[in-house]
Image (tube, coloured by chain):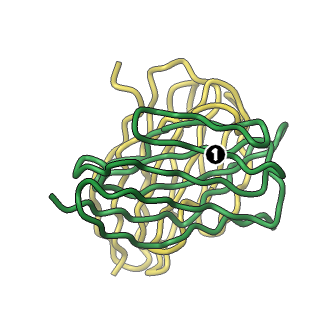
Amino acid sequence: NAGVTQTPKFQVLKTGQSMTLQCAQDMNHNSMYWYRQDPGMGLRLIYYSASEGTTDKGEVPNGYNVSRLNKREFSLRLESAAPSQTSVYFCASTPLAGGLYTQYFGPGTRLTVL
Amino acid sequence: TQLLEQSPQFLSIQEGENLTVYCNSSSVFSSLQWYRQEPGEGPVLLVTVVTGGEVKKLKRLTFQFGDARKDSSLHITAAQPGDTGLYLCAGSNTGGFKTIFGAGTRLFVKA
């Protein structure tokens, strides 16, 4: 089992460019999450998908869109990147929605927006 | 808005020393988790505590959930260089989909 995989690992964008971050899990989990991690601010939830076919906003959704493509895959799209979106992005999954479950994280995507 | 504050933010100690990391909130949480994150990787769960006053041990790590379920601590005995990393606490509530993370304590253990 690979667990949670993310691509790409690193990305540099210019302001205004768009890109999609990919995430896939092979644990048959129902719920998936996108976080961003910034120095001194911990992990902040961008969007989550409690189950296939549903998505909801988290704490910091502005500037992002998501797609739950199927049970395995959950992508995060930046339509017009801004320097404030420079961050490390983590995808996570849980068997079911809810905080009692262990969150399994991917290795992260380090994004720089110039 | 629920917040989790961790202290200290940074800790550098010698191998063999003991340390305690704190996670505090003004809000009550149904459960609290501790994760460890190494450079270039995602966080990995260490423990989940759900009962006020609960104490859990994981080898040299001891986790405690406060009686009022508003705070937690992580105590490491005889720290080793392999304990180096970012320790994150995370709180959640029953029925909620969102987990609140603290900013983390970065621990460096020198050999």
Q: Is residue B60 left or right of residue B99?
A: left
Picture quadrant where residue A18 is located: bottom left
Residue at 31 percent across and 51 percent down: it is B79
Is residue A39 toward the left or the right of residue B31 in the image?
A: left
Residues packed near mark 1 inside 10 Å, few (<14), some (14 to 19) or many (20 plus): many
Give the vertical position of B80 relative to B23 (above or below).
above
Q: Position of residue A93 (x, y in %)?
A: 55, 34
Residue B66 picture location, percent across and down: 74, 51
The residue closer to the viewer here, B102 or B63, is B63
Colour chain B appears in: green
Colour assignment, chain A? yellow
Mark 1 chain: B
Which quadrant of the view contains residue B107?
Answer: bottom left
Q: Secondary structure at mark 1?
A: strand
Residue A39: image location, x then y, percent: 44, 73
Q: Residue at x 49, y 35 (%)?
A: A104
- On the image, the x and y values in percent for residue A82 come to 47, 78
Query: Relative to B37, is B47 on the left or the right?
Result: right
Residue at image position (74%, 48%) is A56
The residue where tag 1 is placed is B64
Residue located at (47% from left, 70% from top): A38
Q: Is residue A46 left or right of residue B77?
A: right
Q: Check disc 1 and give the amino acid type.
A: Gln
Which quadrant is the C terminus of chain A positioned in?
Answer: bottom left
Q: Of all residues shown, which one is farthest toward the left?
A: B111
Position of B43 relative to B111 (above/below): above
Q: Nearer the viewer, residue A88 or B44?
A: B44
